[in-house]
Amino acid sequence: MSTFSGVGVSPGRVIGPVLQMPGAVSEPPAGEKWVESTVDAETARLKSGAKNVQGELRSRAALVSGDAKAVLEATALMAADPMLLKSANTLIVAGTSAERAIWEAGIQVADMLKGLGGYMAERTQDVLDVRSRIVAELLGLPAPGIPASDRPFILAAEDLAPADTATLDPDQIIALITSSGGPQSHTAILARALGLPAVVAAVGVDRIEDGTELFVDGAAGTILSEPGDMERTAAATWTEQSKSLATYTGQCTTADGHRVPLLANVGSGADARKAAAAGAEGVGLLRTEFCFLDRDTEPTIAEQAAAYREVFDVFPTGKVVLRTLDAGADKPLPFLTDSTEPNPALGVRGYRTETTSPGVLGRQLEAVAEAARDASAEVWVMAPMVATADEARQFAHLCSAAGLTTPGVMVEVPSAALTAESVLKQVSFASLGTNDLTQYAMAADRQLGALANLNDPWQPAVLHLVKLTVDGAAAAGAEKSVGVCGEAAADPAFAVVLVGLGVDTLSMSARALAAVAAVLSSVTLAEAQDLARQALAAPNALDARGSVRAGLPILETLGL
């Protein structure tokens, strides 16, 4: 029996055969030149190949929604990236074949992005994936993809390309395991959205022989070959328990009746309808990037209003918290962001684009107001990447000018948590984005498996920032609401800690609602507060998680 340990990013216990992700498209021969062709013909071939790849990715994006749609649309934009194509065209002019040119250009761009670090480093895999797809298109070969099988299997890889993870079939693939990646990688985020057990940063799993039977525990982060009776019983128990967790009444309370509204993170009207069907009381994060990503120009006010109204109408008596455009870093937009920034993760992104492209945010707020005008949903609006009280005040004024009465801010930058009282005096509410808050607090790229232990919301430093935000909101007065819409809210054990710290609402993927509600209903508010104190006092993330999970025996019972 072999055991592999990694970071568990999506719970579940399953047994099945493993299949490795096929290798990438073969590298075109070094020094390959075009013959019996011309510069114009080769550049035209490249342009056509890139356009076909972009079209194929956009077609796949049209078939899905939410995180999957956003990932595919962003990858489609990369297929037409001017920097990538310009680098390749330069090589073609020097005599290099289109295939070899795009291959070398992909290496150049990927190396540059990796050197920038942060969010731009996260785009490295996207570039290399797009490069392989364009080469395959030019050579008339099948595009890289997930292996075919006549029975369900566990998919293993070093890492998974966004375009592949976005279209996984959960009826065919029963778990995901990767040797690299982190808790906020594309693989982790989409595994949670699909409800697939997943373990990342498990060194060596990309070398397990195809067909080997494995036991995967997505909560514990363990993978075992040659599973025995104990593992088979655990997997069978999980299968039965997961059926009971598939339903949720839509009213979450702790064991002593303390109400904890559970909301959903959505990126479209289709997502909102799925969330409502899963029992969400409203929307805690409406990602508005879905209106902007798949285009080269800013959408009109009318186009935006129609898209937002579709979500508002799904929750006629609920709350919908809309996040204004979070462009920049890993979500570049040709009409808004600067791709030449030396460190985009710390650059002009989110609310900061108002300083370089004034007017875009104002028009978006006008569209939100138009969509909300005759809607019965309670519409709240928050700005991402707010760092100071002055920025919060400026955003509140923009909302007021548009006729929106409930402005808020995302707390993703540590400075916003540290000065929460001043920030919250300017707006009505705050929502903690735990993904970025963790990354910035710990100075750890969330895509790097080697830093997965740092990029963990259980880090006591992150928990203290959450507590500072809650305390700051209380000091600001007037019942300032604090929610959490980051991925950490979908972890049932972490959800208990958040409630114990005083967070008012939790927002997550629709699939996580039932499990979070089941665990919260097993503890009183006082017990949650005691577990939160234990986590705050822990010396590290491992001990914080361990002490809380030890106090929640229901997690083991439910396989969470």
Image (cartoon, grey):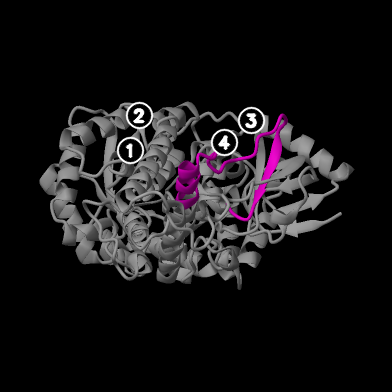
| Inter-mark Cα distance, 1 to 3 | 31 Å
| Callout 1 crowding tier (Cα within 10 Å): few <14, some 14–19, many ≥20 | many
| Inter-mark Cα distance, 2 to 3 | 30 Å
For mark 4, give the secondary structure. helix
Give the number of the disc on residue 315: 2
Circles 1 and 2 in contact, beta carbons < 8 Å: yes
For mark 3, give the secondary structure. loop
| Inter-mark Cα distance, 4 to 3 | 20 Å
Based on the picture, tell me whether residue 339 belongs to the magenta stretch: no
Residue 351 occupies which quadrant of the picture? bottom left
Earlier residue among tags 4 and 3: 3
Per the rendered image, the range of residues in magenta is 130-159
Give the number of the disc on residue 320: 1
Q: Is residue 67 left or right of residue 494?
A: left
Locate residue 435, reporting x and y percent. Answer: 46, 57
Nearer to the camera, 336 or 184: 336
Give the residue number, with chain letter if any, for mark 4: 514
Earlier residue among tags 1 and 2: 2
Q: Amino acid at mark 3?
A: Asp
Residue 69 occupies which quadrant of the picture? top left
Q: Is residue 50 visible?
A: yes
Residue in the image at 38% along x and 50% along y: 78
- Name the residue furthest right: 229
- Name the residue furthest front: 36
Q: Amino acid at mark 2?
A: Phe
Residue in the image at 45% along x and 67% along y: 111
